[in-house]
Image (spheres, rainbow, N blue to C red):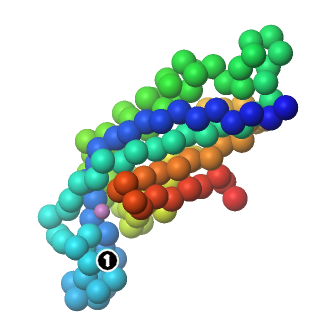
Amino acid sequence: MRVTVHRKAHFNAAHRLYNSAWDDEKNFKTFGKCSYPNYHGHNYEMIVSVTGEIDPVTGFVINLDVLKRIIYEEIEVYFDHKNLNLDLIEFKDKIPTAENIVVLIWNRIRYRLDDHIDLKITLYETPRNFVTYDGN
Ligand code: NI
């Protein structure tokens, strides 16, 4: 029996969507207000979903205290109250869209989990705009 366990988390961060190879006009046409030079913030909400067999000894797919700690260490400490463009090396030459952020989140959690557990991340940039990534 494979069961999926979900845990919600959140962080606040600032970013700017901007391709440095383009002029301001093309950036505005592509990214709209998100290209404004002085950055803007989002309240990012995320759902971490782990799927695996139920351990017959514990009855758990994963110990949620362990998952909570991984999310804290890998995501909240790393992303919360940061400027994604300026503070995170991963976005030095990559645009910090929700798509690129969710892949980074997935990678930072994936390596902390057992191989037999599947991981999917859902990332809300706004209540209506969200992305998902499961490593594929
Ligand atoms: Ni934005």
Residue 63 seen in this snapshot: yes
Q: Quadrant of residue 38?
A: bottom left
Q: Is residue 35 left or right of residue 11?
A: left
Q: Is residue 132 left or right of residue 17?
A: right
Q: What secondary structure is marked by label 1? A: helix
**Which amino acid is tagged 1?**
Phe
Give the farthest residue toward the front: 128
Q: Is residue 2 left or right of residue 71?
A: right
Residue located 50% across and 25% down the image: 68
**Residue 92 location (% of width, % of height):** 36, 61
- Residue sitting nearer the eye, 106 or 5: 5
Give the farthest residue toward the left: 38
Which quadrant of the figure contains the C terminus? bottom right
Q: Which residue is mark 1?
A: 31
- Ligand 1 positioned in quadrant: bottom left
**Residue 23 location (% of width, % of height):** 25, 87
- Residue sitting nearer the eye, 45 or 34: 45
Residue 91 seen in this snapshot: no
In the image, residue 7 above or below residue 85: above
Residue located 28% across and 82% down the image: 27
Q: Quadrant of residue 1?
A: top right
**Residue 2 location (% of width, % of height):** 80, 35
